[in-house]
Amino acid sequence: MRPFIEIPAADGTAEAIVARPDDGQHPGVLLCIDALGLRPRIEEMADRIASWGYIVLAPNTMYRSGTAAETTPTTDLRIPEERAAYGKVVAPFLAQLDGAAMDRDAPHYVAALRGLDGVTDGPIGVTGYCMGAKFSTRVAGLDPTVAACGGFHGAKLATDDADSPHLTLAGARAEFVYGHADKDQTMPPESVALLDRALADHGLTATTAVYPDAPHGFTMTDTSSHQQAGEDRHWEELRALLDRTVGA
């Protein structure tokens, strides 16, 4: 992996990856990682988005629990048993990253993205995966300069909790694209319906879909949850969203 940069966050310093298409001026995109850490797969994803003409920042959002190295699995998560076992390891990390912590960090990450050399003034995009889809939704709700918000195999985006991400949508001005995993226990049909209603109630432009036969984590090639069809569809939908709203 390329060297990390360090950026200020609400409760410390977070490592981050920066991906660029070239040395020119481009719109910025914030990439909110899943629960498996700031690792080579995230670098690959950031590079792919950058290749479309964007400057991408992907922070270690779990910095409260440790460095990127300390919050990234050392086992092979392509083995289903290892992937299942890692849930117990990551649970304490996620406990420190509740909605309030995300909300405190969000403006710092947006400021860091806007402060990168070459990032143009104007609207930005944000995309997130798994727990990162919760983060991307909250960023869009907090910052009206976010014009595009993607969320893929998101976890618990709309619940009865007082800090549920869907409750932040009143402040959003973005266009949203969500790709949900089929039969995902962290985003059951009733949660998808609740999220859709919230988007509609706030008059937001949104496209949501449940990807058929896609497991939670379908974009992640370094895990047993990867599904090529879901990954490919997500890339198509995310690129179209960014291109029509942020405009590379």
Image (cartoon, helix red, strand yellow):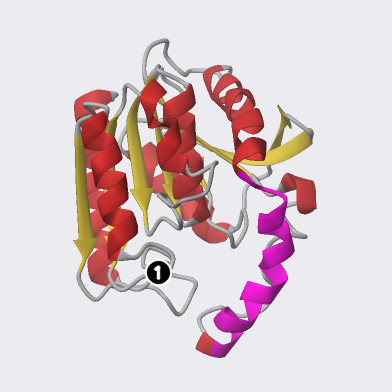
Q: Quadrant of residue 29?
A: top left
Residue that protrudes farthest toward the top in the picture? 121
Apparent side of residue 236 relative to residue 17 in the rendered image (left or right): left
Q: Is residue 183 left or right of residue 137?
A: left
Question: What kind of secondary structure does the magenta stretch mostly adopt?
Answer: helix
Give the quadrant of the C terminus: top left
Residue 234 % position (x, y): 27, 54
The residue stretch that appears in magenta? 81-98
- Dividing the picture into quadrants, the one containing residue 125 is top left
In the image, what residue type sits under mark 1? His
Say which residue appears at 46% left-offset and 21% top-offset: 143
Residue 27 seen in the figure: no
115 relative to 68 in the view: left or right: left
Q: Image height check: is 236 above or below 13?
A: below
Residue shown at 25% from the left, 45% from the top: 196
* Residue to which mark 1 is pinned: 216
With 1 as the anchor, is 93 left or right in this view?
A: right
Q: Considering depth in this image, is 240 or 105 the residue closer to the camera?
A: 105
Residue located 52% across and 51% down the image: 43
Residue 91 coordinates in the image, percent (x, y): 68, 66
Query: Residue 168: which quarter of the image?
Result: top left
Q: Position of residue 216 (x, y in %)?
A: 40, 69
Instruction: Describe the element under mark 1 as helix, strand or loop.
Output: loop
From this view, report whether residue 185 is shown above or below residue 141.
below
Going 40% across and 21% down the picture, which residue do you hit?
Answer: 171
Residue 218 in view (yes/no)? yes
State whether residue 83 is above or below residue 70. Answer: below
Confirm whether the magenta stretch covers residue 242: no
- Residue 82 magenta: yes
Residue 80 location (% of width, % of height): 51, 86
Neighbours of disc 1 within 10 Å: few (<14), some (14-19), many (20+): many
